[in-house]
Structures are given as structure tokens and as C-alpha cells.
Amino acid sequence: MSLDAWFTLFVIVLCFGMMAFTRFPPDAILMAGLTLLLLTHVLTPEQALAGLANEGMVTVAVMYIVAAGLHGTGAVSWLVHALLGRPKSLNSAQFRLMVPVAAFSAFLNNTPVVAIMIPAVKDWAKRNRMAVSKLMMPLSYAAIAGGTCTLIGTSTNLVVNGLLIEQTGESGLGLFDLALIGVPVTIMVILSIIIAGRWLLPKQKAMTDQIADARGYTVEMMVEEAGNLVGKTIEQAGLRHLPGLYLIEIDREGGILPAVSPQEKLQDNDRLIFAGVVESVVDLQKIRGLTPATNQVFKLDSPRSERCLIEAVISDSSPLVGISIREGRFRSYYNAAVIAVSRNGEHIQKKIGDIILQQGDTLLIEAQASFAEQQRNSRDFYLVSRLDDSTPPRHERAVTSLLILAIMILSVTMGWVSIITASMVAAGLMIISRCTTASEARSAVDWPVLIVIAAAIGIGQALEISGAAGVIASKLLALSAGEPMLALALVFIATTLLTATITNNAAAVLMFPIALSTSQDLGVSFMPFVITIMVSASLSFATPMGYQTNLMVMAPGGYRFSDYMKMGLPLTVIVGIIVMLLVPQIWPF
């Protein structure tokens, strides 16, 4: 190998080692590695920056905006309820998640599937008191496995099928030919995660309803008249198992219903009194059919879609001390509405407007974001801080956001436009239709993920351009010693190793002529090798860079590089065994 090839391998090993054994962020490590390759002239500036213009990277970016539109309208909550339901155990949750995701990924690009599901799974995990780290990696792996079930499930299948037609003159594969291997692989991936995930997936702390914290705030919500919650029981409305939140009582037409039964049916204008932690109070504000019981929020100058929730602690010099919220004319003076009050964890048995404020009371306020800046140095409050992701959902635009999503999916499935075109149009429509705002769209994009994808593509270019990838692949295949089964196993290993370091499409393109030549030298059919390349190039579990969906779930799941190795390596071995057993039987040598 050339000096450039050896140096490229050194940089890749160094990057992998730093991600596995240090706490430096992956985007910083990979950008440093890319910079080294640029400084040593292994890559030209154009080659190093090619990842920034990569179609896959841009698709991931705009899909974050589409997901922001679904999240901002509350459509994500609907998806959670419709698809995932309420699991009784972690295994049940993983099964409910992975089966529909794998099914969708068989016909859709898995990037948008995962992008849409990430916020849904985060909310679902919190509501069901589960560690999100037990669900995010299964989400990515199910999407990856599902893509192997059909010819259109992943772009890699289409690329290899195109090479098959071009270089061999064959008619190519049918839409469901790959299901013969893809479906067994997907089933085994799902079963393996359900069985071994309890031990191999990391466990981050899930949100729990600790008694000391669960009564932080007292908040009143009202059931909207003729809303979608009317006639539903507490259980059906999803108000019974809210993490860190407790339904104390219902005020119905002046009468109090304490110790509310989960089978109690909600009625128009019921006032629901909750106590709980601030994160769950924020989630409560997003439930369709519930509105803050205080009518002050509807008298503010700005529309609700432009407001957020802010915490403020009453100071000893505040003019509000010793008088009620109503008497202090809080809304008129501050152009903000108090929706909850926290006082040493106690339940304040008064309506919001009647609460007499004391020094040290923490108010949960609905106001424009500018309130936090205006009052940050005010003597009226000790502390003022804005809560993240607290803008009330635009429920009236939920149908619009789902319609945009459906049009995007249909246009890609029918082959009318490419995935990048469809996703860019969908992202634009989300902003134009005000399902999300331009500022929310900018903040929704996970820039570190995009940097990692772009840098990984650049490093993959170096592996290919320097000739290191081709040398490694040919050396491995030279070990086959004329045995077709051994050659097939080495094709799987080589393709898997390349996919972990360069893009799956690049790995497949690189391995195709080598595998084709090997099959001709052995005098056997090339179809087992083609199918093996398709499967092994798509199923990259062992590294976050191996597939972009792995990178997308890395931050939401709180994963480290080593977490992918723990779960991904056993899965890769299992998939390899299935391929070796089934492919030669279905597509004989």
C-alpha cells in the first residue's frame, strides 16, 4: 500500500480509538481527522468538503425540519398513540416500536422514518417511564434491517441492482426478491434486541415520579368544551400514567371529585388539578383537548404559538408579595399569565388568581420569549429562566402537517421525485403553512450529527482514493483458497468492515467488481455474492458512522461509541450466520 493509504488507516484507527475511549464529541474527533488528511494532502479541499454537499447529509438536515413541523403541531403525539400504544414492559415497547418501523423502512427511505420517530419515541419513553437509551438504538437498527426486505428499501439495493444489470446483462431483481433473506434477518434482529437488549443496551436514568419532586407545581387545566377528550375516561385520555405528575382532583360544576378513578369520564369544562414536576407540567400543556384553566392566557397580546413557558422566583422586594395574583394584575403589568405556582412542594388549594404570593414562590409563566430578557435583571424576581421546548402546540395545524408528510411519502414511493426533492419541498411547506417557524426550523436541525456525517464521508473518500479500501478487500478475498463458501464469508466480512468506515453505497460499489471477479475465477454463480453485498452493505450496526440513522439516534439516546460495539457486533455476527446459511440455499452457487 502507498504511504497515503497507511496514513489514512492510521487516522481512521486514531478516530475510532478516541471515540471509544475518550469523551471528546464525535463531530470534533472526525473533523480533526479530516483536517489531518487535508493538511497532509491525502485529500484535496474539494474532496474533503464533498460531504457537505452529499445528498444524504442534506436529506437528514431537511428531515429535521419536517419532524419539527410534526412535533410543533402535536401530530407526533397522535403518531405515538396510533402506532405505539401503551406497552406493559420494555420488551413489549421494543416490539411495538421495531415492527412498524421495519415495515415502513421496507418501502420508505429509513432516514425520514427515523427522523420522524425520534421526537415521538422521546415523548413515548418519558410518558411510559422507560429509559430512552433502550429504544433509540432499536429504532435505528429496525429501520436498517427493514430496508433489506425490498429492492426499494435502501438506496444501496438499487445501486447494486443497477450494477448487476449494467455489468452482467441480467434482468435484475424483483421488488420482493430480497424478502427471502431480508425478512429472516429483520426477524432475528428484532428478536435479538428484545432478548439481549436488556443487558447489551446502555441504561440511562428514566424519569420517575419521586414523591419529593412530584408535587413541585400545582396546575389547573380545563377540558375544552366539545373537545376530543370529552367522554373519554382518565385512562383513555392518557392522564393516569403521566411521569412525575399526579391528578389530585376534578372540579366539576362547583363539586370536587377527590381520588379520581381511572374510569372516570371527562365532561365539558371539567377543571383538572394536577401536582408534579415542571417537565411534566410542560408536557401537560401540549395535550390536545386541555387548556390552562386561567383565562388570562387568552387575553395576552401575542398568539400562543409565539409564546413559551418561563420560570420566575418571587423576590423579597417584589410588589407582588402579600397580594393575590389577580390583585397584582399580573397579566396587565407583565403581559404574561401565571399558569402554576410552586411553594415548597405543598398543594395550594386555591384557584390560580386567588393565590396570595410569598417570597420564594416559583411561578410558571406563559409569555413571549422576550419576557425572560426583559425581567432577567428585575428586582421583582430572584431568577428568570426559559424552559426549552415549551411553546404550546399548534393543534389546529396537525392535519396539515400530516397531509404534508403523506404527500412526501407518496411522491417518493411512487417514484415521482427523489427523496431529497420531496423532503426539501415538505420542509418548505411546513414553514409556509406555519406548522413550524423559521427560527424553530433552524434550532431543530442537529448540527453535530450533520458535521459527523459530512466528516465521515470525507474520511471515507480518503480510504477509497488512497487505495486502502481496495487493497484490504482484495487481500481478504485472496484468502478464500478456491472455496466458494469461504469466499462468500470473506465478501461479507470485507463489505461489513468497509461499511463501518465509508458510506454503504461506496462500500457496495467498491466490493461489487471484486466479488464478481472472484465468482468468475471460482466458476460459480455471482448471485450469492450480489445478495451478500446488498445485505452486508446495508446492515451496519457496530459503529455510529456505519449508517446515518445510527448517528441520528446517538445524541437522543445518550450513546457512546462503545455502546454500538456492545450491541452491534453480536448482531453483525448473527446476521453473518443467517447470510451464510440462507443465501447459498436460495441463490445456489
Image (cartoon, rainbow, N blue to C red):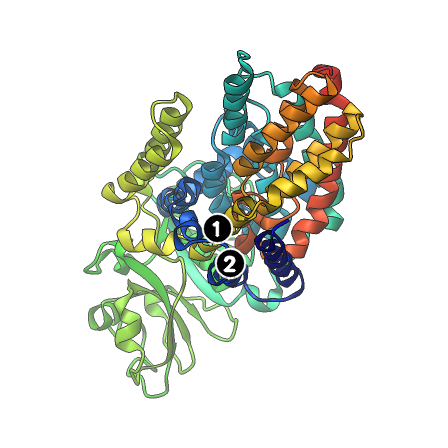
Residue sitting at x 37%, y 64%: 351
Pointer 1 with pointer 2, Cβ within 8 A = yes
Instruction: Give the farthest residue toward the bottom.
Output: 317
Amino acid type of the residue that numbered disc 2 sits on in the rendered structure: Leu
Q: Residues within 10 Å of mark 1 (few under 14, many from 20)?
A: many
Residue sitting at x 45%, y 64%: 218
Residue behind mark 1: 458
Q: Is residue 128 visible?
A: no
Q: Position of residue 322 (x, y in %)?
A: 34, 82
Q: Position of residue 104 (x, y in %)?
A: 52, 29
Q: Residues within 10 Å of mark 2 (few under 14, many from 20)?
A: many
Residue behind mark 2: 37
Res 483 → quadrant? top right
Residue sitting at x 61%, y 46%: 468
Q: Nearer the viewer, residue 392 or 443?
A: 443
The secondary element bearing badge 1 is classed as helix
